[in-house]
Image (cartoon, rainbow, N blue to C red):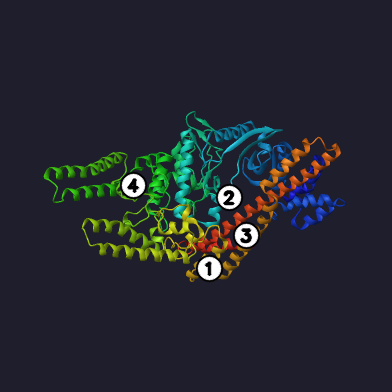
Amino acid sequence: MAASRALVGVTPERWAQIKGVLAGVMDASLDERDAYITRACAGDPDLRIEVESLLASADGDDSFPNVRVAIAATSEHSILSHTLGAQYEIVRPLGRGGMGAVYLARERALERLVAIKILRPELADVPESRERFRREARIAAQLSHPGILPLHTFGEVGGVWYFVMGYVRGVTLAERLRVEGRIPAEEAQRILAELADALECAHNDGVVHRDIKPANILLDEKTGRAILADFGIYKVQCTGEDLTSSGLVLGTPHFMSPEQALGTGDVDERSDVYSLAAVGYTMLAGREPFAGVRAEEMLQRRVTHDPPPLSGTSVPPALAAIVMRGMARERGARWQSAREMKDALVRASGAAGPLPEELRELPAFGPYAVLWALAWSLLAIRRFTSTGDRVLLLLIALVVPIGFALHIWNIGRHGLSAMELARVSFWPPEWWGMWWPRALRRPADLWRRLPWPARAMRAVLSAVIVVLPLLILLRQPFGVKVGVIASAALVIVGALLWTMKHGLSGGEAVRVLLGTTMPSSGWSAPRVVRLLAPAAGGVRPPDRDSPADYRRAIAELVAQRATSARGMATEVDVAVRHLIGAIETCDAESGSLAHVASTGDVDRLTSHLASIERDSTLAVADRHELAELVSRQLALVRRMRDRGEDIARRRALLLNLLHGLWTQLSALEDVPESAERIRALLAEIQRG
């Protein structure tokens, strides 16, 4: 950005002069660079500033290819501002790839942030590249799904080919894996399910992505949702339309399927299933499926070998089995569609998300059938019931169990195992919050993480619901019933006092003491999270949005891992303090900017400017001067708001480093190479 600002308004002649100096710098040795710049820019201090700003934009690296990238970026920024400046205000570059670059911009009409992808100028002269770029935009425009990056518009202006996409504030999965090493199994499972759902949408339209990899997966900072991007080498199945030539292998070797590696062009949706499973493998194992294999052997290796099996206590066997099946070498042995894989992931998670359609009515059906049969059977054996009535009541008792058996038989025809069906059928309803047999609870249930006063109150209420009706039916004395109620009341009062002691609000107290034990946003409230026990013992994870809580969690973790973390405790503490201090600085600056550069301020100034331009009572000179003044104020507010976006992005990156440090320390005793990764991360934090 410094280079871009320094070169605003540069003429073509001046730009040619700058490039001439830079060309000489590239030919000079490192020791001669400063002297060469002094000679070449003698008598023209502005030229020296412009040249040095370009060199600085290479991030201080002495690699001349990086300088060339800086030159290209500055040139593109200037071209974009000239060609699209009327509609979009170019803020800063977001990234660069083989086909072109992506820039963050603000759409002036709607005051929203967007991402603009442009085709590299040298590729824009090649008809095949233009066609590939156009078709990527066309296919992206046809796909509408929350998990697919949306495309707003596409066009060509002054030889610049571009399309405008939605902007996702966050990081790529590749960046997160670089910092954290591995993704926790529960979160990896959710990400895979979301991506499988997005792929199902693309496959339903006959589109095979063919380049699914962590770098093409965005993680939304606000929602955490995984979003699939870059359909640059897709294939349309129904028409055979392909963006590559026959025999040409395109894709990423670590993640492409065996049939894609062979380069025959014979790929279908199962190739995407393989690539998605390979991404899942990388998230869970912390390395690619064929990590360590030489690049020239990579493609042949995946055709002839299976990846090492996923193992370790942190990877649930059901999830490992789903991922490994997705990476089967033979297409017929894989999940046959993205939907099959998504359904398997949802079934394995037991989360509150929608179950596959054939299982949607199954949870709680088993307990309901058992209770139905038990209740009507008890009525049938009462002494005053006649033999005929008893037979009828027993027949009624069999109605629901028979219906349950028929439903199980029908679902079983879809290839689901008996054990899987039995497990799901005895799950409690999603809204259930009382006691339930531990072996029959949903996998993601939070019961074991609840504090003991909450579990005690729920268990007592569950017992009262069962015991009181039995006491009434058995005609027990009134005093016995009152005693049961009084005992339950004491437990409830004690639990309520406990919630008051911990400062819970009314809604939070109800959530902890009575709410459903399935994961939901209500369990993410900071005061509620602090009361939950760690998922697998040890240290309670930090609140994701609380830097101060990371300091607590990391300090406890380092103390717990005294042996393996020996020698790093001081470095870790310094790094945490550095990150938290930087985040607090971002928060303070964001707070200041929010008061003077909000959307409301932009709308107010825009409306004021329009009213000035319409006001015919003012003298022409006064109206022009006042309009110019408000225009400058509006431009300043917009720049400050862009500054706010830069600060928000920096804060997100700092928090990502903090979370990565926590994750790496958590895996320190489980992953041998984790200590090396932690030291590399500490060095990166120190440099930043």
Q: Which mark is residue 170?
A: 2
C-alpha gap between disc 3 and disc 4: 45 Å
Residue 246 appears at what percent x and percent y?
Answer: 52, 33
Which amino acid type is marked by label 3?
Ile
C-alpha gap between disc 2 and disc 3: 16 Å
Kind of element beneath mark 3:
helix
Residue 605 appears at what percent x and percent y?
Answer: 73, 44
Q: Horizontal placement of 285 versus 373: left or right?
A: right
Which amino acid type is marked by label 4?
Pro
Q: Which mark is residue 555?
A: 1
Which amino acid type is marked by label 2?
Gly
Badge 3, how many Cα within 10 Å: few under 14, some, many 20+? Answer: many
According to the image, label 3 marks what residue?
A: 583
Kind of element beneath mark 4:
loop
Outermost residue toward the front in this view: 478
According to the image, label 4 marks what residue?
A: 363
- Tag in front: 2 or 4: 4
- Tag in front: 1 or 4: 4
Q: Is residue 406 visible?
A: yes
C-alpha gap between disc 2 and disc 1: 27 Å
C-alpha gap between disc 2 and disc 4: 36 Å
Earlier sequence position, callout 3 versus callout 4: 4
C-alpha gap between disc 1 and disc 4: 42 Å
Earlier sequence position, callout 1 versus callout 4: 4
Q: Which mark is residue 254?
A: none
**What is the quadrant of the C terminus in the image?**
bottom right
Kind of element beneath mark 2:
strand
- Which of the two residues, 605 or 467, is positioned nearer the viewer here? 467
Earlier sequence position, callout 2 versus callout 3: 2
Earlier sequence position, callout 2 versus callout 4: 2
User: Vertically, is 42 above or below 163?
Assistant: below
Asked if marks 3 and 4 touch (Cβ < 8 Å), the reply is no
